[in-house]
Image: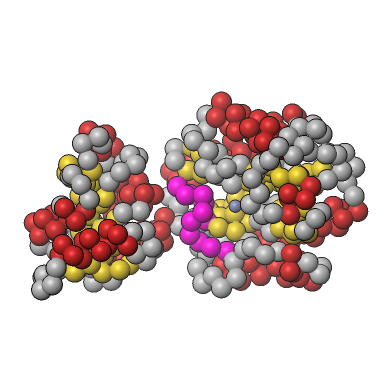
Amino acid sequence: MNARLQRLRALLQEKELDALFVSQAENRRYLSGFVGTAGFLIVSSSKAILATDFRYTEQARMQAPDFEVIQVRGEPAEWLLQTAGDLGLKRVGFESPDLTFYTYHRLTEAIGRGANWQLVPTEKLVERLRSVKDPQELAALTSAAHLADRAFEHLQKTVRPGMQEREAAWEVERFLRESGSEFIPFELIVASGPNAALPHAHPSERRIAGGEPVIMDIGARVDGYCSDLSRTFCLGKQDETFRRVYDIVLGAQLTALATLKPGMTGEEADNLARTVIVQAGYGDNFGHGLGHGVGLAVHEEPRLGMNSKDVLSDNMVFTVEPGVYLPGWGGVRIEDMAVIEQGKVRPLTGSQKIYLD
Ligand code: ZN
């Protein structure tokens, strides 16, 4: 944890901030190790404070040894001024994408005019640190990825035509939880036939039929770290559209995995796959980005997509998930989670991608 605090402190110096007020849940856990669901951090050049309420004080003391734990009551407007005053802080950064307008408003009201300190908006300081994983994080992500692979294997053995999408989704969820996954990071997707044309479909009571595309998008969680895996399959004989679209999407995905390099921006990475799909004539049917970082959150930095200036580097973990969606027919998405290691991309998920005739 201490190395993470050191990296954050270097950033604070660069931004000329006396401290960062951390409200974002995963950032709180990342910096402190505290996994409780309520609390705030104040990190200055010399102090690291975790403020939480009565319910979590004991837990926080055990889980966040690098932090001084203080017990607070009520909202930040009722105690942050005192804490900041005691520490002699002048410029305190806050996480502008996360702090609610309500809390911000109450805080500025409490600080009032003529105060000798101010709140300074910051964006994604800790998120940027989180995007580069350390060995401990990579181990958890690898376990979560393997668990997702095993769940896909399980689904392949159990799914039959006539099964409802939500029955299939529950089968996967049950397997994941019984195999050691912590709470599932997102609503699992099993989308069949025309439902597969919706990139974020909810599993419905629709019964899966033979010969139609089925997209499965699942993830597990290990030690707080998520995985994200999608495969598209077909029970029974595929139609001609399935073969054509599947080969294009797989070609795009393999191209990106083989040619993506550190130093590229998220936009350049996205383009590797997008070019393949555009040239095949399906550019308009690939309406989302190529992928996203995965860690304590299932969607985090870096973003791989159009207009993303995020620069990819070693030890980043992200998904590579091109898709083509045809309204009325369905869709194909193939998603792996991968890490960049010593300049090369290595997939962490390994479920088979070849459909069988
Ligand atoms: Zn994803």
Residue at x-position 22% and y-position 33%: 58
Along the line of sight, the residue nearer the viewer: 314 or 60: 60
Residue 295 image position (x, y, % from top left) = 48, 49
Farthest residue, direction top: 178
Residue 120 image position (x, y, % from top left) = 26, 69
Examine the rendered structure and indicate whether residue 256 appears above or below residue 156.
Answer: below
Residue at x-position 37% and y-position 66%: 123
Q: Is residue 262 visible?
A: no
Compared across the picture, whether 199 is left or right of 43 comes to right
Residue at x-position 54% and y-position 70%: 308
Residue 339 image position (x, y, % from top left) = 56, 53
**How is the rendered protein coloured?**
secondary structure
Residue 50 image position (x, y, % from top left) = 23, 47
Compared across the picture, whether 353 is left or right of 8 comes to right
**Magenta span:** 293-304
Examine the rendered structure and indicate whether residue 35 appears above or below residue 26.
Answer: above
Examine the rendered structure and indicate whether residue 250 appears above or below residue 275.
Answer: above
Q: Quadrant of residue 21 in the image?
A: bottom left
Along the line of sight, the residue nearer the viewer: 14 or 171: 171
Residue at x-position 63% and y-position 56%: 320
Within the magenta stretch, is there residue 296? yes
Compared across the picture, whether 265 is left or right of 15 comes to right
Along the line of sight, the residue nearer the viewer: 51 or 277: 51
Q: Is residue 72 visible?
A: yes
Q: Quadrant of residue 129 in the image?
A: bottom left
Tally of numbered discs: 0
Examine the rendered structure and indicate whether residue 96 appears above or below residue 68.
Answer: below
